[in-house]
Image (cartoon, rainbow, N blue to C red):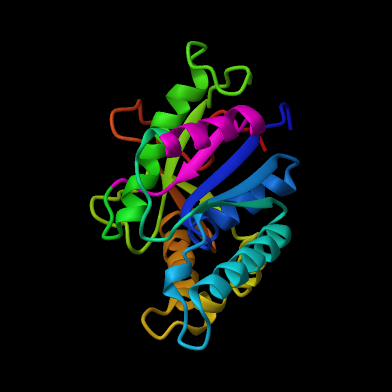
């Protein structure tokens, strides 16, 4: 490893970041890079009938911490409410403040087209926060400016409209650990509305088939950037 980086995977809800890029994150954590899973909300309104929204929020935060530990990273959940996320100055500034404090190098998040409003807003909030964190003209609690080097989108079953992968990362050696991390989430293992565990296991295998590996996870460049197809995060040494 030539240079240590900080990879931040950002999801709208606890669980999104891990299912989309958990194996990629684990690959880079094993190589000595810092990894943070940032959840803008807990995703608490998908609570099962036997538990309150408030209690489910606490449960999902604990699950996210367990999953992150297995993957070699840390978990952070903000206080915004599930299905009520807003792209406003308060939210953008809060994320920009975190960028300045935690100094991530690379951020991975949702694709821009999604059936879920929180998912669609997430990359917009991050893009605006990146600009605000980077510009010295914005004063944020005395923190020095910090700019990301890159941002990528990752694959979620709710965000698939026009999602065409640019990067296939071989995660064959990391995939069993990834599945163990996913199993920490109640909704992934018990949802009756969608077979999360089966879907993401099969997705990893399918993406691996396309790139001639056992398992793979994918990334997509933001719209308008200089796309260079590849099999690893550009400029992010292993």
Q: Does residue 32 appear left or right of residue 203 in this picture? A: right
- Let me know if residue 212 appears in the view: no
Image coordinates of residue 30 in percent, x first then y, are: 73, 49
- Which range of residues does the magenta coloring cover? 90-112
* Residue displayed at 52% across by 63% down: 15
* Residue displayed at 24% across by 55% down: 161
* Residue displayed at 39% across by 59% down: 156
- Residue 109 in magenta? yes
**Quarter assignment of residue 68:** bottom right
Please tell me which residue lies in front, 70 or 234.
Answer: 70
Please tell me which residue lies in front, 67 or 43.
Answer: 43
Farthest residue to the bottom: give it: 50
Question: Measured along the vertical axis of the image, is residue 20 above or below residue 165?
Answer: below
Q: Does residue 64 appear left or right of residue 215 in this picture? A: right
- Residue 76 in magenta? no
Q: How many labels were placed on the picture? A: 0
Image coordinates of residue 115 in percent, x first then y, are: 26, 60
Image coordinates of residue 16 in percent, x first then y, are: 48, 59
Question: Measured along the vertical axis of the image, is residue 55 above or below residue 49?
Answer: above
* Residue displayed at 73% across by 43% down: 31
- Quadrant housing the N terminus: top right
Question: Measured along the vertical axis of the image, is residue 139 above or below residue 28?
Answer: above
Image coordinates of residue 82 in percent, x first then y, are: 42, 61
């Amino acid at each position: 490893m030539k240079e240590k980086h900080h990879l931040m995977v950002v999801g709208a809800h606890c669980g999104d970041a891990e299912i989309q890029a958990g194996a990629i994150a684990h690959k880079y954590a094993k190589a000595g890079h810092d990894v943070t899973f940032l959840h803008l909300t807990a995703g608490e309104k998908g609570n099962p009938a036997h538990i309150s929204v408030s209690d489910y929020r606490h449960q999902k935060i604990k699950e996210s911490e367990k999953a992150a530990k297995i993957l070699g990273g840390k978990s952070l959940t903000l206080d915004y409410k599930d299905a009520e996320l807003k792209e406003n100055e308060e939210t953008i500034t809060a994320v920009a403040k975190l960028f300045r404090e935690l100094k991530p190098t690379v951020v991975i998040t949702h694709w821009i087209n999604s059936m879920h409003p929180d998912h669609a807003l997430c990359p917009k909030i991050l893009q605006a926060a990146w600009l605000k964190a980077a510009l010295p003209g914005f004063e944020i609690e005395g923190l020095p400016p910090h700019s990301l080097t890159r941002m990528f989108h990752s694959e979620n079953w709710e965000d698939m409209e026009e999602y065409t992968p640019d990067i296939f990362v071989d995660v064959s050696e990391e995939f069993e650990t990834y599945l163990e991390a996913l199993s920490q989430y109640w909704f992934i293992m018990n949802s009756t509305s969608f077979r999360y565990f089966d879907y993401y296991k099969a997705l990893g295998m399918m993406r691996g088939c396309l790139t001639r590996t056992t398992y793979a996870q994918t990334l997509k460049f933001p719209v308008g950037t200089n796309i260079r197809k590849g099999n690893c995060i550009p400029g992010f040494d292993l």
